[in-house]
Image (cartoon, rainbow, N blue to C red):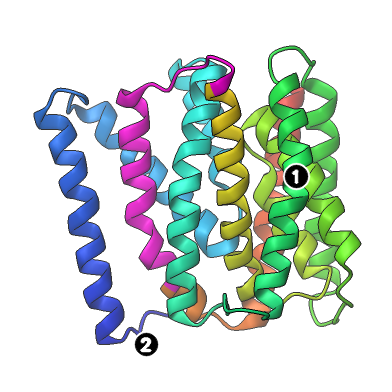
Amino acid sequence: MFGKIDVRHNSTTIVWVILVLAIFIFSVTKGIVQLNPNILMLMFVCFFCELMDSSLGMGYGTTLTPILLAIGYEPLQIIPTILVSEFLSGMSASVFHHRAGNVRFVKKSLDTRVALVLAAGSIVGVIIGVNLAVQIPKFYLKLIIGIIITLAGVIIWIYVNRSFSYKRWKMVSIASVASFNKALSGGGYGPLLTAGQVLSGIPGKASVAITSFAESFTCLVGATLFLLKGQHITLELLIPVCAGALLSVPISANIVRNLNEIILKRSIAIVTIGLGIFTLINTIF
């Protein structure tokens, strides 16, 4: 899986890791972050959540949100933090995926058009989601999203060898629903968006990279709206979360680069089903 790493990729990865660690160490020396086993464990968890997210297009917010809730952070501390960290990691992942050849983010390419359509389609959903985040009951929304995610994974698995036709209206619809859920709960965007693209005819590798791009744009809008509404971001939480997530980005791009398309689609199906079931269990119990 990791045999095809070129020198340029290695060099960029080393520089990236040094830069991320330097920023984290600087924040520790300035007393912004207190270095302790809990912070290191948080970075470790974020690393693997983002590794999964940038490799399969899903799983970061959906997995990390309940973990941070269990640790004791409040929802309105968690969601803006996840939005900011995913803006940074998603945009970074887009660049690394493009450099690795998983996607073609060039002028007039299909990948660029799909990414822009998804980003634009997310605006309405994320605006509505942010405005309802502090007042709408989340149980039924999470229940419906969990069912949709699970069914999407099952459909991908059943039709893994089938090609689907690309339709722009499908992309806009999927982006609106996914971004609404993202702004409301901090998760659920990637599974819907990645699975939706695969079921709309976009190759698995490109779907993962496009999701990273569209999600970063959505998270930027969502985080900005939260800040404009007077919500604050806790730097002591944000910095280790971002550091752990950003460290995984170059590795995930290389994983996708060397995965067989069918294996990638089956992996997307399995993780989508798992996250759908996880969402349902977390909602019901």
Check disc 2 and report the residue beneath it. Answer: 4
Residue 78 drawn at (x, y percent):
50, 25
User: Is 3 on the left or on the right of 267, as rendered?
Assistant: left
Q: In which quarter of the image is the C terminus?
A: top right
Q: Mark 1 points at which residue?
A: 178
Instruction: Give the quarter of the image for residue 211.
Output: bottom right
Q: Distance between the residues labelled 1 and 2?
A: 34 Å
Query: Residue 245 in the image: x percent, y percent?
Result: 39, 48
Residue 224 placement, left or right of 6: right
Mark 1 secondary-structure assignment: helix
Q: Is residue 283 above or below residue 101?
A: above
Q: Give the range drawn in magenta.
A: 228-253
Q: Which of marks 1 and 2 is nearer the N terminus?
A: 2
Task: Give the dominant element type of the magenta stretch: helix, strand or loop.
Answer: helix
At a point 9% along the width and 30% down the height, the residue shown is 29
Q: State which mark lies toward you, 1 or 2.
A: 1
Image side of residue 266 versus residue 50, left or right: right
Residue 275 drawn above or below residue 154: above
Residue 251 lies in quadrant = bottom left
